[in-house]
Image (cartoon, helix red, strand yellow):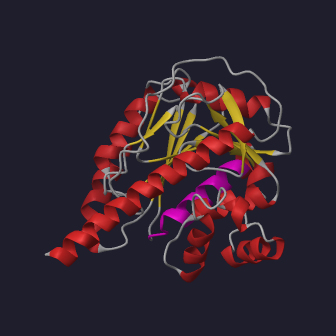
Amino acid sequence: MNAPIALFVYNRPWHTKKTVDALKENKLAQKSKLFIFSDAPKEKKQAAEVRKVREYIKSISGFKDVAIFEHKENLGLAENIIHGVSKLVNEYGRVIVLEDDLVTSPWFLNFMNDALNMYQDEERVASVHGYVYPIENLPESFFIRGADCWGWATWKRAWDKFEKNGKVLLDEIQNRNIQKEIDFNHSYNFTQMLKDQIKGKNDSWAVRWYISTFLDGMLTLYPGQTYVLNIGIDGSGQHSKQNDVYRSKLNKNKKLKKINIEENKFAREKFEVFFRKINRGYLEKLFIKIKSFLLA
């Protein structure tokens, strides 16, 4: 059985349509059930766009079945995802997760379902991830410790490890003194993201999912070339700013081969180099802005 697909939408009709159009081109779309979770507007100014999205999703076809859940009150992205993922894994035991700004390769569903079947009984495997950074010379597939959030899939046994309370996670990081490992050798500040979540500065479910699985020693399977493009890093998303550094060519069909369940140190080091590169670029742009302001 193909895993159910959870699609989370809000107030971006153009992005939502692009996401669905690409998903419909997947080889397994007509054999897959699509569950759409539509959040309610947080403020009146978002109501018109939310309404447009809800009108559009009612017209969607091309899947085995389409079920729509329209929230009457605004849950926020994190709570919407936590609710929807929990609902589907409890009913089906597994789920494929997309947000409204993720364009997929026609072979995305094949990759996800093949991996879900291949590693379903492997307790150390937390999830399967469809996106990978634009990094050259990665293995065809590999494992990295933790979990990720741009086009992913998991099983109930792994989602049960999700710790919603960020303070519990932070205490464990500090007790075990593993901030350096969590932060990819200080190349990306996931720990600070978690601290900000605890303070209410962000509402990231993703950092809690990543750290929950990392603390449990679990791994996520990645492809060597991405099956997903994020078209929402254009300033339109709730938590995004315009950025093109994550773009790469979509993967064509490759038969998935089972590999040893261990973290790929080479790929992890490649991730660190990429994180340092994008953070350096951000700091350079910030310095230029500050310098221009001071000289004005």
Q: Does residue 96 appear in the picture of this structure?
A: no
Q: Percent position (x, y) of residue 195?
A: 60, 76
Front residue of 282/199: it is 282
Q: Is residue 151 above or below residue 296?
A: above
The x and y percentages for residue 49 are 27, 58
Between 198 and 34, which is closer to the camera in this rendering? 198
Secondary structure mainly formed by the magenta segment: helix
Please indicate, yes or no, whether residue 116 appears anywhere in the rendered image. Answer: yes
In magenta, the rendered stretch is 74-89
Taking the spot 48% from the left edge, 24% from the top edge, the residue there is 106
Q: Residue at x 20, y 70 (%)?
A: 292
Name of the residue lying farthest toward the left: 296
Given residues 115 and 43, the one toward you in this image is 115
Q: Is residue 48 above or below residue 290?
A: above
Is 208 situated left or right of 30 in this image? right
Quarter of the image where one finds residue 173: bottom right
Q: How many marks?
A: 0
Q: Position of residue 115 (x, y in %)?
A: 71, 31
Q: Is residue 122 left or right of residue 90?
A: right
Residue 85 on the magenta span: yes
Quarter residue 79 falls in: bottom right
Q: Residue at x 55, y 66 (%)?
A: 204
The answer to which image quadrant residue 178 occupies is: bottom right
Q: Is 173 included in the stretch rendered in magenta?
A: no
Residue 47 in the image: x percent, y percent? 28, 65
Q: Quadrant of the N terminus?
A: top right
* Vertical side of 143 occupied by 82: above or below: below
